[in-house]
Amino acid sequence: MRLCELLPGELISVDSVQVYRGLQIGANKPSADERARIVHHLLDVRDPDEEYTAGAFYADALRAVEEVLARGRVPVLVGGTSMYLRWLVSGRPEAPKADPAIAERVRLLLAPLEASGSWAEGLEQLAALDGARAEMLSRNDWYRLSRALTVALQTSSTAAALPRLPDPEGLDALRSSLDLRCFFLAAPREALCRRIDARCEAMLEAGLLEEVSSLLASGRLLPSSPAGRAIGYRQVLDYLLRSPWAPAEGVALVEFLEGFTAASRRYAAQQVKWFRNEPQFEWVEADWAAPETVEQHVLGQLDLERARFEQLLQAPRQAELRALRPDEAKRMKTYAPRLRALDDAAAKAALLARADACRAQLEPHLEAMQAADAELSRRYPWHKEGGAGADAEDAEAVAKRLKGTDGSII
């Protein structure tokens, strides 16, 4: 937000949960005061039972970019939903939706090659079918290799020969004309995890349990909805609707707290892995004690010629920042969250009382809610494998097919 004030600019959210109306605390949406300070886009654009695809984001985001530019301001896109970012940075896929059987065949072919680091051998598989597309791939971009190989096998055609997708609004041309400067704020792993744990606790203290129970009671949020699969919301839904249920159940509360924070940390790890494989993003060291240093760095990078910015993306320092750190991985093996509700008996009792009050609010609505959710689950059967901001238990199954989209574990 400070960057938007300095430029000046307007903020466009790149977050698959913030698009949903009614989800405030768990989505970490900006407050009313923050929205008054800076114009925000792509918040509250769908109801919780509606899907919001990468294609919908692509169109909405570029329309917002066009509006911001027309006002003589700078669009600042902020968020970590990888598929949204991929479409925006790399462009709309000019290929049909993947055939699941072929995608699985490609996954089985490439998985052992990726595990052994055999990039050249993996690339040969695509080069035999589409040499031009193979030459365009960045080294170790296993996601795009998988997608390109799936398309080549499915269409029996090269990427260049595929028909162009219709673009009546000219959004593809607009995207191609943009000078996108992309940044990823990198932080030490343990420090990041501590901040994530603190944010999860802050959400609970701010009323996440009450927000979810109110949305449930009103029928606006259901477990099988796209929004109901989001990290934080999913864990609260599972906790409040658990069966069998008993009041003042301390073990269930501990499991909920540990599951909520662990899922959030895993998702952050998935994001870090995704950005590590995206060469268009400059990695910038986060300095939470002095955020102005990051702001000034970004402002300086915006003033550079495009060629110079791209040259700096290849600098040795970027490779250092992206590199895996064995010492961090070793320390994280013994990582334990420090949660007040786990360590303070009074805090735990207070949270239990609030959870029981939420469940009491839901009791009269449970039967109708279950019937509505059963109906909704028929619309979204694949949500058993993940949804908006799905946690890693679900995402691991998806990541095995879409390797590189996300997928690591803290």
Image (cartoon, grey):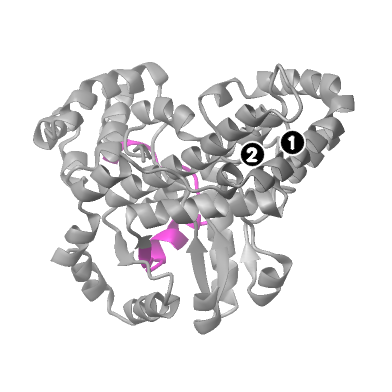
Asked whether residue 229 is drawn in magenta, I would say no
Question: Which stretch appears magenta?
Answer: 160-183
Point out the image quarter for the C terminus: top left
Image position, residue 190 (x, y; %): 36, 52
What residue is rendered at 22% in x and 26% in y? 110
Image position, residue 357 (x, y; %): 82, 37
The answer to which of 216 and 177 lies nearer the viewer is 216
Which residue, as the protein is rendered here, is positioned at the far right? 364
The quarter of the displayed image where residue 134 is located: top left
Residue contact at pointers 1 and 2, CB within 8 angstroms: yes
Q: Which mark is residue 233?
A: 2
The answer to which of marks 1 and 2 sits earlier in the sequence is: 1
Image position, residue 99 (x, y; %): 40, 21
**So how many labels did they put on this image?**
2
Q: Residues within 10 Å of mark 2 (few under 14, many from 20)?
A: many
**Would residue 325 be seen by someone viewing this image from the given angle?**
no
Identified by mark 1, the residue type is Leu
Can you tell which of label 1 and label 2 is closer to the viewer?
Answer: 2
Distance from Cα at disc 1 to Cα at disc 2: 9 Å
Q: With respect to residue 100, does 64 lie above or below?
A: below
What residue is rendered at 47% in x and 39% in y? 262
For label 1, the residue is 221
